[in-house]
Amino acid sequence: MEVLGIDVGGSGTKGALVHMETGEMLSDRFRIPTPKSRKPEEMAEVVAEITSHFNYKGPVGCGFPTVVKKGVCKSPGNLHKSWLDVPIEKLFEKASGNDFTVINDADAAGYATMNYGIGRGLKGFIVMITIGTGLGSGAFLDGRLIPNFELGQIPYKEYSKIETWAAASAKDAEGLSWKKWGKRFNKFLELVELIVNPDMIILGGGTSKYFQEYEKYIKIETEVIPAGLQNHAGIIGAATGCLVNHPELYLG
């Protein structure tokens, strides 16, 4: 069965149809810039536009760029502060007319990588870092998700959260070279290694496809590898996450 997966990001919101059993994308990715306001109503309109683009009616899986508990936003993250405590699933359902399952975007990307990508079959404690507007993180113990593992929120020096200093958005905003940004990202990875000591770190998000540009600046002992699915992982994981949370929707 096919399900629509939507990946909500700080700069763009993307969607595609995904095959549930294989994790294969069955359509081209459709992208709309995330509204500059990053407010709930405007972002809900974009999500509804994506469902309309595919002329889709049915269950939708959605990755969302902050902490999500039972479909509710528990931290505004890099979005507008008015997102706090908004019932995301209900908001998107009202805007689109579709049933929504909303999970943290890094959890979604990690789920795709651990089930259909390079992480499939890996045992131990695996952390996936998605590099984009922020630094998302998904944690898996023997393949099972530990939800809302937000390592990008670690305070660092004068910054309230390290992702402000070390995400891909900081590289773009400050015009940093790969060397300068790579050293910042390595500092973030050093903290991840110190705090949670994973067996492996998998990098996702669009910046992971440029891994060879900054690989030499990563000095931690933990093995670090690119995910391979890159920025499609969020869409695939969101869709398949919908199946995990609501299996009754697909019976028969």
Image: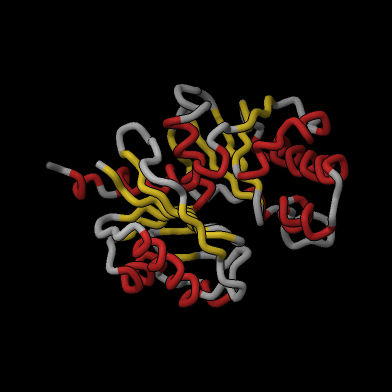
Residue 210 appears in view: yes
Vertical placement of residue 191 versus 165, above or below: above
The quadrant the C terminus occupies is top left
Residue visible at 56% across and 66% down?
34
Residue visible at 39% across and 51% down?
5
Vertical placement of residue 227 versus 65, above or below: above
Residue visible at 56% across and 71% down?
35
- Answer left or right for 213 relative to 12: right
- Answer left or right for 117 relative to 99: right
Residue 155 % position (x, y): 74, 56
Residue 197 % position (x, y): 66, 32
The answer to which image quadrant residue 223 occupies is top right
Residue 29 % position (x, y): 46, 49
Residue 66 appears in view: no
Nearer to us in this view, 82 or 59: 59
Residue 98 % position (x, y): 28, 63
The answer to which image quadrant residue 243 occupies is top left
Nearer to us in this view, 246 or 204: 204
Residue visible at 24% across and 41% down?
1
Colour style of the rendered protein structure: secondary structure
Name, please, the residue furthest toward the left: 252
Label count reads 0
- Answer left or right for 160 relative to 29: right
